[in-house]
Amino acid sequence: MSDKIAYARHGDIAVLTVKNPPVNALSQAVRQGLWDGINKAEADTGVRAVLIVGEGRAFFAGADIKEFGKPPLDPHLPDLIRRIEASPLIVVASMHGVSLGGGLEVALGCHYRIAVPSARVGLPEVHLGLIPGAGGTQRLPRLAGVDAALDVMTTGRQIGAAQAHDLGIIDVIKDGDPAENGLAYARELLDAGATRRAVSELPLPAPIDWDATFGATLARSKGQISPAWCVRAIEAAYAGDFDAGMKAERKIFFDLMQTDQRKGMIHAFFSERAVGNLPELKGVAPREVSRIGVIGGGTMGAGIATAALLSGLNVHLLEMSPEAGEAARGRIESNLSGALRRGKISPDQHSKILGDALQVVTDYDALAEADLVIEAVFEDMAVKKVVFAELDRVCKPGAVLASNTSYLDINEIAATTSRPGDVLGLHFFSPAHVMKLLEVVVADATAPDVAATGFALGKALGKTSVRAGVCDGFIGNRILSTYRTCADHMILDGASPYQIDAALEAFGFAMGPFAVADLAGLDIGWAVRKRKRAEGIDPRARDAAYADKLCEDGHFGQKTGKGYYDYAAGPKARVPNPDVMPLIEAERAAQGITPRDFDDEEIVRRYMASMVNEAAKVVGEGIARRPLDVDMTLLFGYGFPRYRGGPLKWADIVGLDGLLSDIKGYAEADPYFWAPAPLLEKLVAEGRTFDDLNKEEG
Ligand code: CAA
């Protein structure tokens, strides 16, 4: 028998203990071991019941995702579950930790299910671009009803033991050791004369309007197809017997396995875990951080302070005057009330945070004992240098000094201190207590344990942290600046901001670039453009000044009620601002441009080509260590559709040679903007992909 399953006999009960750390994924060896274990128990004279229990953190985290995309190996999971369900012995599942995907499906194939109160179950396959593929779509509706089953499957969310019990998924909840609980429960069942039972033999619940539900689910999923296919898989249960339903589920599962969405989502799954796993930081211990300082209590500083407070850190927030300090406290209180309303913290935690964890101060000396200080003041190099000189003066030796700058040169900031090794960038995204992305900007002199501290802080704050090198805009804003420029060029040439937003939202972006700009504040881009103009813009670059005119007229987007859109009817109204097109038309006329038509396909192709080209430069220059670092930056900070995996995974999927020839074609009209990235040319010449680079770095 496979060494992944231990077989033991306790009187007339056989125990199959799963040993496949860290999370008992159902790899081929585990499936084979369970199959053999059931055979062995049935052949073992005197055995009347079988207990399946997981060792370590979980019952089962589901199918082994590493096997996806490879030829399926015997025994297949649906066959194994059918085999378990068909056993004449009583089969009991004792669940703890998570039972997800194929893991829950194994439990549903067992005859009885007991779980500890902290157990969680779910069918998260939609997050991998799939549907449950081992009977989940056929068994769960029979047990919990169609609506509940659809909710679990289409959201992929985990539910707790109590709710699972209410839905009939768990028979008994009992605290204690899962193996001991399972044995006691199996004994109880045998003593009570309980008999084998099977979920697949339960009658089907009342059907629903399948077409309407399919359509509504598709519309809700923003381009992702797998949630809607859960509906079709359940519907199939009604067309024939259980086996026919299983066949239909299997076909949909394998069809989805072939899709680009599945590839994109599995890339996202593994990259999300690899992104904080940097070879250069292996074995480097972070510095201790329990008390942090935040300088500046505007939207960003207050958001950073909120994130830190929510994760249990003590915060000293520095403002320039008691009035500004009060305003900052107000912003933090309002953020915390939101967290309280959404159930993220208890009323008790809320008052504790506001009671002692937050101190608003006006004197730098109050930061003397901080372990880490994050500066979130006005985006101006001279101002930042003054702040860092003060920090250098007051902070204790070994304190980590961080700047939240979005664009400015951390090397230059670090050089103004006597301790450049302690300085790094921690670039949060607004609102900082909500957005998941944190760019950890490692400057030339940043000490390895300071970089490690940035990642440790990100983890403590529940962020997805990405390592970035120093350049204008780091990874995310540098790429944003390029694709936004591409959008401006298309506008000059004839597209409208509204058509571009619509085309990109249809591609899957959470919001188009102009709606995003309105949300972030048009003054931010304006300040960057002014700075770049002051530094000197290359004469070969095309300029689009119409956006400046909007700002000059006082329109900064949502916060002033008008930007590209008019928000008089509310932030979601998205009514085009009638002032915008005349500004664009005037600029086209001033530049002597005759506008032409763009179709949505060309908009997406150009926009994505510019994004991939800049991303390839960012990787080629070492600003991002790996393509996956770019992918996760765009996914977690810029609304890139998860089901496309990230811009560089998307590029691999559509083909790098086609993209490069598009770029070269566009370069004929504008060779400056469309200069191909050397890394992209190299990969095409060598017939390799960005993902090959991820594997090399692995
Ligand atoms: N297959 C293979 N590896 C898996 C895995 C799986 N199903 N689930 C987790 N892992 C790996 C992770 O990649 C990670 O590996 P590294 O340490 O090498 O990075 C390790 O296990 C630990 O995972 P996390 O870091 O995510 O640990 P966590 O405690 O934060 O979360 C978890 C644990 C909740 C199980 C989370 O990993 C998770 O959600 N896993 C995916 C669950 C899932 O999607 N299951 C459905 C699979 S599809 C299926 O089952 C199809 C079917 O119907 C047949």
Image (cartoon, rainbow, N blue to C red):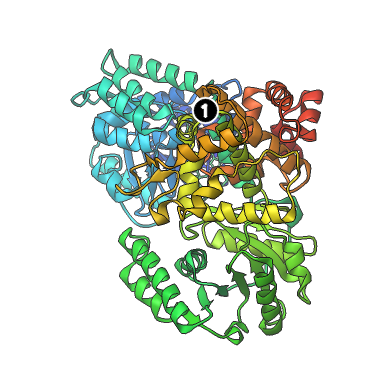
User: Whole-percent x and y of residue 114?
Assistant: 33, 45
Please, is residue 527 above or below residue 159 in the view?
A: below
Please, is residue 441 above or below residue 52 in the view?
A: below
User: Whole-percent x and y of residue 479?
Assistant: 64, 43
Identify which residue, 372 or 553, lies in the foreground: 553
Left or right: residue 143 compared with residue 230: left
User: Whole-percent x and y of residue 321?
Assistant: 50, 82
Residue denoted by label 1: 261
Residue 678 occupies quadrant: top right
Please, is residue 488 above or below residue 409 in the view?
A: above
- The amino acid pointed to by label 1 is Gln
Q: Is mark 1 within 8 Å of ligand 1?
A: no
Identify which residue, 392 or 323, lies in the foreground: 323
- Residue that appears at 52% across and 28% down: 261
- Residue that appears at 51% across and 57% down: 462
Identify which residue, 469 or 252, lies in the foreground: 469
- Residue that appears at 46% across and 48% down: 518
> Can the viewer see residue 400?
yes
The quadrant the N terminus occupies is top right
